[in-house]
Amino acid sequence: MTRAFIVGCPRSGTSVFLSRLGRVTNLWIAPETHFFGGIVGSGGLSSTTFRRKTLRGRVMRWVRRAATVFGMGTTIDTTHLDEMAEHLDLDILRQKAVPKSRRLAVNSAYFVDVFDSIATSRDNEGWVEKTPRHLEYLNIIGRYVPGVRFLHVVRDGRMTVASLHDAAQRYPEFAHMSDVDRCVQRWNSYIRITERYAAKPNHLVVNYHRFVEDPQATLVQVADFLGCSFHADDAGEAEGGEQEESVMPGEHWKSRVAAPLEDTGLEKFNALFDDAQRAHIEATLIESGSVERF
């Protein structure tokens, strides 16, 4: 049973990559669940993500970290799972009893059981879940999900910052990313996490630009990494018909995940920001936002 998570900075192409992966493998492609952030507690665990400057914020993060050391978190919030069950008409999910535990091992086992059961019922070889922010919980997921593998999608920081800033103007769900420096901080913090895990054997970094340039080569590599079958498809160019199953109702920012692949380069970055802003962004991004090293 293949168990995998796609992670990365939001607006890095994770949804597009997930869509193409689903076309060429026999894996169940799941909607975003935000599950592990939910059972650990809001605010994240990583010290590199949005450092809280208040004493209360620092204390709360320390408490969460201490709790996870002893395998404790919070009870399961089923909001996202209930929406997924309704969207995909998943009787299996409705029938599973949700534990009332705060133990990370118990709640993680429930998640694995649900996803394994859904994949088995659909005759899939396994499943892939994509919640970008699960990047902050790699150690928790790695500890409690047997045989798990991680796919880190990385995209040029300048392009990602421009896309985050643009999304903040278009979608209320991204309003918290309206500040450009916050966008830069998000990309920097997430790329640092990816750098720490990149060499581990159950982690693979997917360079989005190389994926767009040669999708089949990337997807063959990923299928081999995941240990699942690969079937050739027009994953690189064909435009999807029906709405992607992994796109939940209301996720309007994912409306083009099935569109033909294209790398628009710095077009949006140059259009949204003036010379001074571009210079500031490039000066504050790690390695000026380059992902060539991956």
Image (cartoon, rainbow, N blue to C red):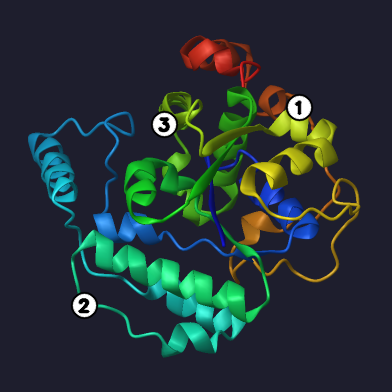
7 to 105, vertically: above or below? above
Assess disc 1: are there few (<14), some (14-19) or many (≥20) residues with their C-alpha within 10 Å of its C-alpha.
Answer: few
* x and y, in percent, of residue 104 in the image: 25, 60
Which comes sooner in the sequence, label 3 or label 1? 3
Q: Compute the Cα span from label 2 to label 3.
A: 36 Å
Q: Which residue is mark 2?
A: 100
Q: Secondary structure at mark 1?
A: helix
**Residue type at the position of mark 3:** Arg
Q: Please give the name of the residue rendered at 51% of the width and 71% of the height, measured from the top-left corner.
A: 116
Q: Which residue is mark 3?
A: 182
Q: Is residue 216 left or right of residue 100?
A: right
Looking at the rendered image, the disc whose residue lies closer to the viewer, 2 or 3, is 2
What number is the disc on residue 267? 1
What number is the disc on residue 132? none
Q: Compute the Cα span from label 3 to label 1.
A: 21 Å
49 to 95, vertically: above or below? above
Which comes sooner in the sequence, label 2 or label 1? 2
Res. 1 in view: yes
Assess disc 3: are there few (<14), some (14-19) or many (≥20) residues with their C-alpha within 10 Å of its C-alpha.
Answer: some
Q: Quadrant of the N terminus?
A: bottom right
Q: Please give the name of the residue rendered at 56% of the width and 12% of the height, measured from the top-left corner.
A: 288
Q: Is residue 259 left or right of residue 276?
A: right
Q: Secondary structure at mark 2?
A: loop
Q: Secondary structure at mark 3?
A: helix
**Residue type at the position of mark 1:** Glu
Q: Please give the name of the residue rendered at 79% of the width and 31% of the height, measured from the top-left corner.
A: 264
Assess disc 2: are there few (<14), some (14-19) or many (≥20) residues with their C-alpha within 10 Å of its C-alpha.
Answer: few
Q: Tell me the quarter of the picture where residue 248 sits.
A: bottom right
* x and y, in percent, of residue 163 in the image: 62, 37
Q: Compute the Cα span from label 2 to label 1.
A: 49 Å
**Residue type at the position of mark 2:** Lys
